[in-house]
Amino acid sequence: MTELLGKAWQGWIDYIDEGKLPALLFAALFFLWLSRRKAEGKIGQKAEREAGQKALLLYTSVIAVCCVLPFTAAVFMKYQTKFYDYEWIWSMVPLTAVTAWGGVAVLEEIWPKQGERDWRRGLSGTSLLLAAVLLCGSLGRPAWSRTGQAEKRRHAYEVLCQVKEIYPGETLCLWAPREIMEYAREADAGILLPYGRNMWDIALNGYSYDVYEEDTAAMYRWMEEPGTASGTGANAEGTSAEDGGPDSVSGRLCAGYAADAGVTCILLPESRSSETVQELEEALQVKAQKLEGYWIFYGWAD
């Protein structure tokens, strides 16, 4: 339990490091609870609506506080199993809906009522509210993506652009290192991949049993970590010293896996040995071409 408590607290710290939207949520909850006093005593359909709103407010307030407090957050993490990270417990909180509701309620208060002409107050208040939203959120990207990730994205886009210029086929199914595949679909939705980001980011899987077949997993390990791509079906034939010997999957075997998976283009880091490049050339019966920082293989599927 102590370990879970530590993970829960660290998870909360990491969560707010990427954006301050939880702060907006609590501000919206505070304003909505205060504004409810004006609606008390209403009857009929209005009262029924107010009852539903109160239930939503109560649920959101309780669950949000429980997600922040380490003990209750640890209980939630225990319930959802260790497969999921801390951030997943916030899926129980209607953060976007209630924050938007609070924003609308604030706008209703600051904009002039019918017959009033003080529109400057509404405009300035709206500007401040919009600024608060922009400053508290990262607009879908973690804050750290603005530095190192931006450079990686730019490099991947440049490489993918060169691949599209060189590759003559209509359908491009690309097998490449992680730093390229991570941005491939973002750069061009028409690019197909033998595996996605959930290969290395397990939290993206919808269920714990969403796993890739061993052949596909061996392709990823061979591409990213030469010498550790241990898998089924491997034998001494066709292995190289770089690939770890008889007990690891060879580049020749992974090339076969790639072809079976429908891959039509392979990018191999330039840092890989000449023996590995030659091994893929022999397995695919194509000649590798030089690309900026990579070797590119294509044409065997024609």
Image: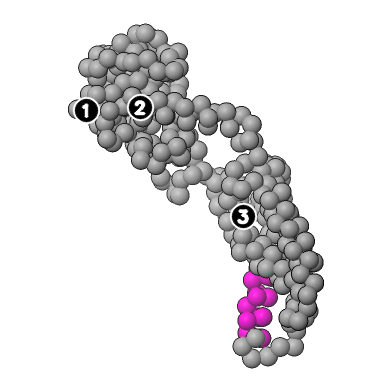
Q: What kind of residue is marked 2?
A: Glu
Q: Is residue 57 magenta?
A: yes
Residue 130 visible, this angle: yes
**Marker disc for residue 165:** 2
Whether pointer 1 and pointer 2 mark residues with C-beta atoms closer than 8 Å, the reply is no
Q: What kind of residue is marked 3?
A: Trp
Residue 6: image x %, image y %? 70, 42
Q: Which residue, given by chain and number where applicable, does mark 3 sit on? A: 90
Residue 30 visible, this angle: no
Q: What kind of residue is marked 1?
A: Ala
Classed neighbour count for the residue bearing mark 3: other residues with Cα under 10 Å, few (<14), some (14–19), many (≥20): some
**Marker disc for residue 301:** 1
Residue 144: image x %, image y %? 64, 36
**Segment colored magenta:** 47-61
Classified by dominant secondary structure, the portion drawn in magenta counts as: helix
Q: Which residue is depicted at the point 64% across and 31% down? A: 147
In the image shown, does 158 or 136 lie closer to the viewer? Answer: 158
Which residue, as the protein is rendered here, is positioned at the far left? 302
**Quadrant where the image shows the C terminus:** top left
Q: Is label 2 in a helix, a strand or a loop?
A: helix
Q: Is residue 299 left or right of residue 185?
A: left
